[in-house]
Amino acid sequence: MEFLIPFFSRPDIRHAPWRCAVKSHSRLAHLAATSYLNGIAITAPTLPLDNAFAALPPAFYTRLMPTPLPAPYFVAASAPAASLVGLDAARLAEADYVALLSGNTVAERSLPLSAVYSGHQFGVWAGQLGDGRAILLGDIATEHGPMELQLKGAGATPYSRMGDGRAVLRSSIREFLCSEAMAALGIPTSRALSIMGSQQGIMRETVETAAVVTRMAPSFVRFGSFEHWFYRKQPDELKILADYVIDGFYPHLRAASNPYQALLAEVCVRTAHMIAHWQAVGFMHGVMNTDNMSILGLTLDYGPFGFMEAFDAEHICNHTDQQGRYSYANQPQVGHWNCYALGQALLPLIGEVELAQAALDTYQSAFAEKMNALLRAKLGLHTQHADDTALFDSMFALMQANHVDFTNFFRALATLQVAAPEHDTALRDLFIDRSAFDTWAAQYRARLSQEHSVDAERQAAMNGVNPKYVLRNYLAQVAIEKAQQQDYTEVAKLLEILQKPFDEQPEHQHYAALPPDWASHLEVSCSS
């Protein structure tokens, strides 16, 4: 069939980036349900686990046990994530949960497995990949549907590709904090339940200590899960996977005249909306490979991510990304490219190129509509006007020219008073070219006057969508360095602050400050 994936080139910076049920018990699991922690017999907690993914044919995964983590200990847990699956976060520090969530014991009803998938990495077909350091324990039924529990860093799998299958404390803290921070920002994301650590040495650029993150999502199926079967020319498995996703997560699509086309369209819209949310808070994923793209439109696989500080649309948060494929400006276009890759994989099921193209065409309009709605909310606008695009474009051009701090600017913008430009001093001081700000602010005030905006009401609304606190890299680094000295208090404090990103929290004001000079030397890469 005709190849759908378009050539990808970096967009000109002048093109604004803001446009664009197994019930059986496993004998192995039963044998592993009891282990020893510091010489004490530990029995895995009873969890109401099923594993719907394990009901797929064996070609979709490899059944295996986690590799025990030497002398594991509790680092952190998220109470909001725990509540989603009916767990008490305070209990996760107990020895039986430490053993379970580090992979040293396995609950009796668990059917541990690692999934196979493939993908495009930095735009190049990489072939077979798979869960190289992730092991799915199973899923827990919740009022919102099943939630899978997955151990990241629980040892080597058949898909580790020369890797050790471990995660290090540094990257585990980053993923844990950012997953929960994104959830608090209202952005679709996988969740992080806990971190368990160990003094086991793990070689990366240097020797680091090991950790296991328990992360959660309704499903960890990726775009690359479909690409795997397409490029292997196995249409039966491709259909099995598509039916599994539709029946389990998009049952309303079954009534469509072409459910597979409807699936592609739905995923395009969800992906576009997710990336619009990223752009609206200045979040950069860093590795938007197709194997890191969720079929549910969730932010997945936190590695070299970053939140925009001094605004630069071409900023590259991933030090490994030398060509800037995954820069802030490129994220919307990359999302579309990835949807094309998914469309190519689904084409044998959809049947006609024109039908696949029609589904793919939903992406750009979905992104533009969502992005514009989010920007209107960020600026406190409650009506839609024809000149909004010009207002947004001039705002981002002003931010670009002055490299203004992304988060602080939008938070401070709420203090603007329509009839009192003389009170703009603190807001103006964010800009090098204050007269340029005055020119834009006059346009903004005129727009606010058109809809009779009330200062107090607008400020409250803006503060509800423009966070004061985001996970800046230097804040994560401070928490990591303390944790590497076995002081986990900063991880807990950051988690508490980031779970209320829109609150003033005056006692934590310094966590909203501009990064210190030393932070300019921080780099995150694919090993992060």
Image (cartoon, rainbow, N blue to C red):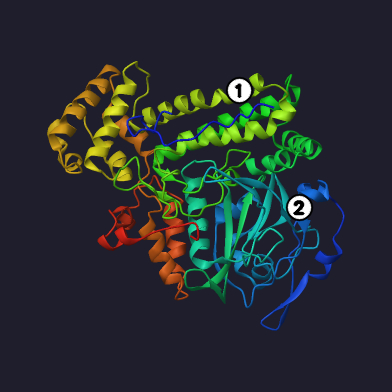
CA distance for labels 1 and 2: 31 Å
Task: Please tell me which residue is depicted at 64% across the width and 69% down the height of the picture.
Answer: 98
Is residue 349 toward the left or the right of residue 70 in the image? Answer: right
Q: Pointers 1 and 2 in contact (CB under 8 A)?
A: no
What's the residue at 40%, 63% (across, down)?
477
The secondary structure type at the circle numbered 2 is: strand
Q: Residue furthest bottom?
A: 39
Would you call the spot at circle 2 few (<14 residues within 10 Å), some (14-19), or many (20 or more)?
many
Q: Amino acid at mark 1?
A: Gln
Q: Secondary structure at mark 1?
A: helix
In this view, 143 is above or below 333: below
Where does the image place residue 217, in percent across and percent down from the top left? 63, 47
Residue 247, horizontal then vertical, whole percent: 76, 34
Image position of 419 (left or right of 235): left
**Taking 188 as reference, is 249 left or right?**
right
Q: Left or right of 335: which side holds 506?
A: left
Which residue is denoted by mark 2 in the rendering? 61
Q: Nearer the viewer, residue 401 or 478?
A: 401
Crowding at label 1, few (<14), some or many (≥20) Cα neighbours within 10 Å? some
Residue holding disc 1: 357
Residue 257 location (% of width, % of height)? 74, 19
**Circle 2: residue type:** Tyr
- Vertically, is 56 above or below 173? above
Residue nearest the viewer, comparing 192 with 221: 221
Task: Report the number of numbered marks.
Answer: 2
- Residue 397 visible, this orientation: yes
Q: Which mark is residue 317?
A: none
